[in-house]
Image (cartoon, helix red, strand yellow):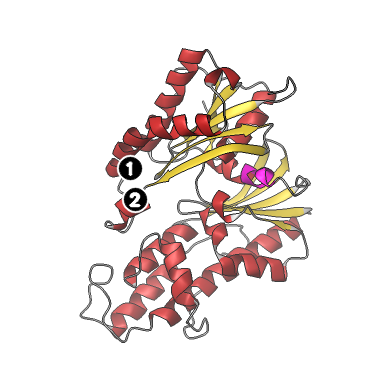
Amino acid sequence: MGRGETRILGIETSCDETAASVVENGRFIRSNVVASQAAEHAVYGGIYPEVASRIHVEAIYSVVSEALETAHAGLEAIDAIAVTRGPGLAGSLVVGMNMAKGLALAANLPILGINHLEAHLYSIWLVEDEPEPEFPLLALIVSGGHTELVLMEDHLKYKRLGGTLDDAAGEAFDKVARLLGLAYPGGPAVQEAAEKGDPKAFKFPRAWLEGTWDFSFSGLKTAVLREVRERQPELKAGVEAPRPGLPIADISAAFQAAVVEVLVVKTLEAAKDHNAKEILVAGGVSANMPLRDAFEAQSKLPVRMPPLELCTDNAAMTAAVGHRRFGAGQRDALDMDVLPSWPLDEKPS
């Protein structure tokens, strides 16, 4: 490593991925290891927090070790450790935090607590073959637990414009997938089913919440539930597999179209209203291909989205934020606590 280079070890355990990464100068991924728990949680149709915590404990050491080995870097080559502090599942966050604290103490390294939502935004900076985004940016963070519109005025400077009032978009995908008897996680399963369906087959509602930049997908989810139960009243939706004859492809396509339309229209309107130069779309749901296609077709502004492997939770994005915050002088105490509920635009107490 040259004298002008900075290497950050990132650790991420906010939900159901155990991840570690070494990132150089905030942009160049030297390793990015992710151990997914999707198969373990599929039997529950969603994240089982206690199971997630236990699997993190079992995986964290080997994941971090592999990240360092792949990057050909021991702790002596690391400048700081960036760890997801929140938001997320408390029990999962604690596992990553304790690992980071132990390493920081053993190697006498600075430790940085990172906001998981901020990390999703910085996944865009990890696309090496593209120029860095230009401020001000209008960012849509869309994932299993979050749907938020954020004005990013400069590095590390944010203004939250609005967010979901109930179900996040990714959460709605998971719940609808379960209603239709599709696999977990719901996003890829619904997208695959929708490929054979007609998005105009059902007129599912769009909650525009005029005058705000907020979102709501609870009514849409309920509309799908009613459709399923009206067609198969004997079915305990989400518990038994749907009977033959339920138009799963059409329902999936119409549901997905409703989610995509609201996300795209509100994001484009917010970008115009706040004179943004570019749009960022990040988070697990940004991997949805109809969403990507709609932004590309409808936006007059450049739209930046991370590659698919950086859409879902990973530690490279945590390390990317860590680089910025390390350069800005952030150093956190070893006794800091996790913050399961941590708004992006609020400083931790």
The residue nearer to you, when weighing 275 against 127, is 127
Mark 2: which secondary structure?
loop
Look at the image and tell me whether residue 15 can be seen: no
**Secondary element at tag 1:** helix
Q: Where is residue 19 in the image (x, y as percent from the top left)?
A: 46, 39
- The magenta-colored residue range is 122-127
Left or right of 109? Residue 185 is: left
Badge 2 amino acid: Ile
The foreground one among 208 and 175 is: 175
Label 1: how many Cα within 10 Å (few below 14, some 14–19, many 20+) = many
Question: Which mark, residue 52?
Answer: 1
What x and y, as percent, mark residue 214? 56, 57
**Above or below, 113 relative to 16:** above
- Between the C-alphas of marks 2 and 1, the distance is 7 Å
Residue in the picture at 39% in, 74% down: 224
On the picture, is 127 further left or further right than 221? Answer: right
Q: Is residue 237 above or below residue 143?
A: below
State yes or no: discs 2 and 1 in contact (Cβ < 8 Å).
yes
Magenta stretch encompasses residue 278: no
Magenta stretch, overall SS: helix
Q: Please rate how many residues cluster around mark 2, counting C-alpha atoms within 10 Å: few if below 14, some from 14 to 19, many from 20.
A: some
Q: State the residue at coordinates (64%, 42%).
A: 122
Tag of residue 16 = none
Which residue, given by chain and number where applicable, does mark 2 sit on?
47
